[in-house]
Image (cartoon, rainbow, N blue to C red):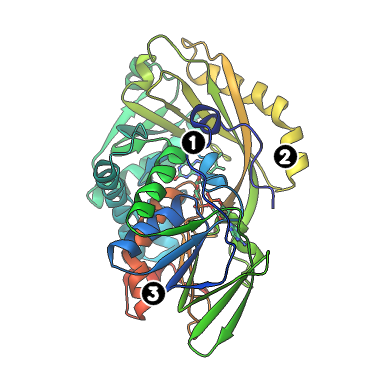
Amino acid sequence: MDIRSNEPYWLIKNALTNSYSSLKEDMSAEVLIVGGGITGALIAYKLIKEGKKVVLIDRRDVCNGSSAASTAMLQYEIDAPLHELIEQRGLTCAVASYQNCEKAIFDLKKIVGEIKSDCQFEFKKSVYFSSTKKDVDFLEKEFEARKQHGFKVKWLDKEKLQKLGLIAEAGIESESAAVMDTYKFAGDLLEYCSEKGLTIFDRTELESVKEENESLSAITKSGFKIEVQHLVYCTGYESVETLKEDIVDLKSTYALASEAFRKIPKAFKDHIYWNTSEPYLYFRGTKDGRIIMGGGDENFKNAKKRDALLPKKEKNLTKAFNKCFPDISFELDYSWAGTFGETKDGLPYLGKPDLDKNKHYVLGFGGNGIMFSVMGMDAILNSLHKTPHPYLEYYKFGR
Ligand SMILES: Cc1cc2nc3c(=O)[nH]c(=O)nc-3n(C[C@H](O)[C@H](O)[C@H](O)COP(=O)(O)OP(=O)(O)OC[C@H]3O[C@@H](n4cnc5c(N)ncnc54)[C@H](O)[C@@H]3O)c2cc1C
């Protein structure tokens, strides 16, 4: 599957952070992780810390899937608003999902600090805003739900938003959010794990898996065998290639990066933004003075059709930016497109599709994909050891 266009800003900025050799012989390990994006890197970090013998393979160069395209707004605010998620999945699951996404922001920061990654991680406040009067009631409902369940939120009226530089009807300001360069972080984390014993092979594609009693034989496209007890698929949107259950709607999404401002505009110093439109728009700044924005989702995943729409999306998204922030001149520098996936409840899929087999999945789909991948670290050992964990219930297959 072609999951992104050629020029995400992060790839140009960082180039190839690290290259590993491809697999050229049969081998064995305790766990095979398939996929070397941010999810594979985080899961490898967790398993290596537990002293497991782990091999990781990726069919591309590592971190060159969706993780290279991510705009990396790190939020506890899930695509499904809290008050709707409570209706859909019940109070316990909904509130715990929001709370654990918030915890994941801080868990991630700890790892950034531990491995000393220069991935431009910065804490921010997030503003969820409505540009139209008709969404204000919805926003009020969401504000009440978040306040009731202990989230630190503030109501921003038109005047307060205008002081920030944003033209909108109303907004919810949330205390906990962050941004980073996902591509750089995932690359740094893989390098750290490799120094601690993780064996990595890039340009090594998993083609098939043979099951023999308790062990699994993973066969690569070039014909080599990796014998393991457990296989963890961190294969992102391409997981639809190996899953029987239809769990995700794949779409196309678009992102733009502005030229660097000499000084980042005040609106983007401490805040990131997303709105109530469908599909939603979102905006953030970078440490090197750019503004990154995204949105314009289309309900198809055809890569040719997706990339052909880029020039039109550049125009429309820039226009949408100017409407929201009329005092900031957005000079387009880079644009890219990617595949994006939404689940029916905005929540991830973690654990085993078939409880009798040792094939595990960590699939952080949706606008909070990265936070869900961090949360996957908390449940992966339980999945491996067949012990209960709330996430393996909330985010199970077949739900
Ligand atoms: C434009 C855009 C903006 C986004 N913005 C945000 C955001 O603001 N906040 C947020 O939290 N999330 C965001 N996301 C989502 C986020 O980027 C993803 O959730 C995250 O990058 C997924 O990481 P991953 O490691 O699971 O997948 P990937 O990075 O795609 O990694 C999966 C890897 O598996 C490998 N693979 C697949 N199949 C095989 C196989 N058979 N054999 C070997 N290797 C295989 C692939 O080569 C790939 O490298 C955004 C996504 C896009 C596209």
At label 2, the amino acid type is Arg
Q: Residues within 10 Å of mark 2 (few under 14, many from 20)?
A: many
Q: For marks 2 and 1, give the CA distance.
A: 18 Å
Which residue appears at 31% of the width and 25% of the height?
270
Disc 1 within 8 angstroms of ligand 1 (CB): yes
- Residue 338 point in image, percent of width and height: 62, 41
Residue with the mark numbered 2: 306
Which residue appears at 71% of the width and 25% of the height?
311
Res 242 label = none
Which residue appears at 63% of the width and 68% of the height?
242
Secondary structure at badge 3 equals: helix
Secondary structure at badge 1 equals: loop
- Residue 107 point in image, percent of width and height: 27, 50
Q: Residues within 10 Å of mark 3 (few under 14, many from 20)?
A: many
Res 383 label = 3
At label 1, the amino acid type is Thr
Does label 1 or label 3 sit earlier along the sequence?
1
